[in-house]
Image (cartoon, rainbow, N blue to C red):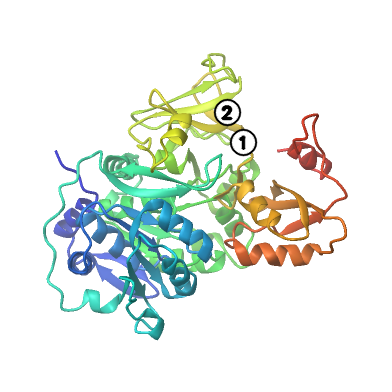
């Protein structure tokens, strides 16, 4: 039995060849045109030396190039490694080396950092420049066996690649990097079936319109599993139309919704918060919307109520993680949702709560760690058997999130087991930032925590103790972090303290920092 996620695009092309598949900046790609580009790039990837099973790293924004590269890689049997477009060179190098990526495809805006990283990644011999000056001198072939290519020629006058690689349902389709709850980012291996069924589930919902009439707005980053599954794969599987927005902007988003009569929007809480509060966005601009899905972080109840009341909508909150492809639970649509709840497990998925001792929680409204089991759970973390065994036990994925379940089986997230920070839907692990801070010559001690933020959910705060005799200002340390970390990671607020609170063993008490600075998470 074979299953290749590129099949969803091929089959929609057979059904709707002349229909708009992608719209971006006023340009339209029909299904036939999109599939042709996918086949041409697939042929070029094979021609430059890529073989089935080798990994393709994508550092591309929300433009047609992402789905073209994504499905081309799947077509020839190569797992995709989507990379956050805001990563810096050191971070990209880590991801390329850790994922054993064989080729890096990077957009013009990311090229400087991407090229710097590629030169330091010995196991990644191929680079493809997409957009901008694709023939720039710095893209000349390397003498050490590395070769760089321009995107445009790879799509021109190239024979179509027509042989769909016979992937099995269990073959890895995508490796999504997640900060998780321990250590450096880890690559969650998602199978062909993980992704295919999670996208198909969206189409099984009782929508108020035929699934092939979906017009979805993709403002979520495509390097994130939420954007890939709930929008890219789901909409193209349906034979709908996907409107790509390179960067979310509330007023621009509302304008695109109005212009293209978008009826399906999925986003993280910060997006809904911005749409609700941005000046000049009227209910009429969003009047075409029929289905709004929210995930990525907990949504304040008051925001849901105000958004629904303002725009006459029924926002549906769901829950999941990169490791669960990502959708694991969802509220009912067309009535029955419970505000403040993440809903119940989707079809074929089980959820349960376990206490600190590992026993199953059976009493309603009692806290425990939420664990997920089902067709959506990842295969494991790439090349990390120990990390995998820590979170995958007897098929149950331990999320690290603390939840309660009511008498009707609805779950509500109440806390996080570890110190993971979720800023605007992005996972941030404090240790990575602390390591950067500790590398600064003036820093003696550092602790990073997340504090509540009205639009981002949480903001990154760092607390510093300087070395005796050393000088540094908060602004200088913020700038230092900004130069070493992706935009969404660096701390916006750094406070210099004479000492950090510590317990009897000398461990820094992060909760004490949160408490003393006006918020308890």
| 103 w.r.t. 465: above or below | below
Q: Is residue 336 left or right of residue 490?
A: left
Judging depth in this view, the residue of 186 and 28 nearest the camera is: 186
| Residue highlighted by disc 1 | 418
Nearest to N terminus: mark 1 or mark 2: 2
Q: Is residue 385 left or right of residue 481?
A: left
Mark count: 2
Q: Is residue 159 left or right of residue 237?
A: left
Give x and y (percent) for residue 154. 23, 74
Quadrant into which the C terminus falls: top right
Which quadrant of the figure has residue 245?
Answer: bottom left
Quadrant into which the N terminus falls: top left
Image point 60% across, 61% down: which residue? 485
Please say if the residues under marks 1 and 2 sit with CB atoms less than 8 Å apart.
Answer: no
| 215 w.r.t. 18: above or below | above
Give x and y (percent) for residue 278. 62, 63
Give x and y (percent) for residue 313. 50, 48
| Residue highlighted by disc 2 | 403
For the residues labelled 1 and 2, the Cα–Cα distance comes to 13 Å
Give x and y (percent) for residue 329. 45, 34
| Residue count near mark 2 (Cα–Cα under 10 Å), binned few <14, some 14–19, many ≥20 | many
Which quadrant of the figure has residue 487?
Answer: bottom right
Image point 61% across, 19% down: which residue? 366
Image point 85% across, 51% down: which residue? 497
Note whether residue 290 is visible: no
Note whether residue 281 is visible: yes
The numbered dot on residue 110 is none
Q: Nearer the viewer, mark 1 or mark 2?
A: 1
Judging depth in this view, the residue of 433 and 217 nearest the camera is: 433
Q: Which secondary structure, mark 2?
A: strand
């Amino acid at each position: 039995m074979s299953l290749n996620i590129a099949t969803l695009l091929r089959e929609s092309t057979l059904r709707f060849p002349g229909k708009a598949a992608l719209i971006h900046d006023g340009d339209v790609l029909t299904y036939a045109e999109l599939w042709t580009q996918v086949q041409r790039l697939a042929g070029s990837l094979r021609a430059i030396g890529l073989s089935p099973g080798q990994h393709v790293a994508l550092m591309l924004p929300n433009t047609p190039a992402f789905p073209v590269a994504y499905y081309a890689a799947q077509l020839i049997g190569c797992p995709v490694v989507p990379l956050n477009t805001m990563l810096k060179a050191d971070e990209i190098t880590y991801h390329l080396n850790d994922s054993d990526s064989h080729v890096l495809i990077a957009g013009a805006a990311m090229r400087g950092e991407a090229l710097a990283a590629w030169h330091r990644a010995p196991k990644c011999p191929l680079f493809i420049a997409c957009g901008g000056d694709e023939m720039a001198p710095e893209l000349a072939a390397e003498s050490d066996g590395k070769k760089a290519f321009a995107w445009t020629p790879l799509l021109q006058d190239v024979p179509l690649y027509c042989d769909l690689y016979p992937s099995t349902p269990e073959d890895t389709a995508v490796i999504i990097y997640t900060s998780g709850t321990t250590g450096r980012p880890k690559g969650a291996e998602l199978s062909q079936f993980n992704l295919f069924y999670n996208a198909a589930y969206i189409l099984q919902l009782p929508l108020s319109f035929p699934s092939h009439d979906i017009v979805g707005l993709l403002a979520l980053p495509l390097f994130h599993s939420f954007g890939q599954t709930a929008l890219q794969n789901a909409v193209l599987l349906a034979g709908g139309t996907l409107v790509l927005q390179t960067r979310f902007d509330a007023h621009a988003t509302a304008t695109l919704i109005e212009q293209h009569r978008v009826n399906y929007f999925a986003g993280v809480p910060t997006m809904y918060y911005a749409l609700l509060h941005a000046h000049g966005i009227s209910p009429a601009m969003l009047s075409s919307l029929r289905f709004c899905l929210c995930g990525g972080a907990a949504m304040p109840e008051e925001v849901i109520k105000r958004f629904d009341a303002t725009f006459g909508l029924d926002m549906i909150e769901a829950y999941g993680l990169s490791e669960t492809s990502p959708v694991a639970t969802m509220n009912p649509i067309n009535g029955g949702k419970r505000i403040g709840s993440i809903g119940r497990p989707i079809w074929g998925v089980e959820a349960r709560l376990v206490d600190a001792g590992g026993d199953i929680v059976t009493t309603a409204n009692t806290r425990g760690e939420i664990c997920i089991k089902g067709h959506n759970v990842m295969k494991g973390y790439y090349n990390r058997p120990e990390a995998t065994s820590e979170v995958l036990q007897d098929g149950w994925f331990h999320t690290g999130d603390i939840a309660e379940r009511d008498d009707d089986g609805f779950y509500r997230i109440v806390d996080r087991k570890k110190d993971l920070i979720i800023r605007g839907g992005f996972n941030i692990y404090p240790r990575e930032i602390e390591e950067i801070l500790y590398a600064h010559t003036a820093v003696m001690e550092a602790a990073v925590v997340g504090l509540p933020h009205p639009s981002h959910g949480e903001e990154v705060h760092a607390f510093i103790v300087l070395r005796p005799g050393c000088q540094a200002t908060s602004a200088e340390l913020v700038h230092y972090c900004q130069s070493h970390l992706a935009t969404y990671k660096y701390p916006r607020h750094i406070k210099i303290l004479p000492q950090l609170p510590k317990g009897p063993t000398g461990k820094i008490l992060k909760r004490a920092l949160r408490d003393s600075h006006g918020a308890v998470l």
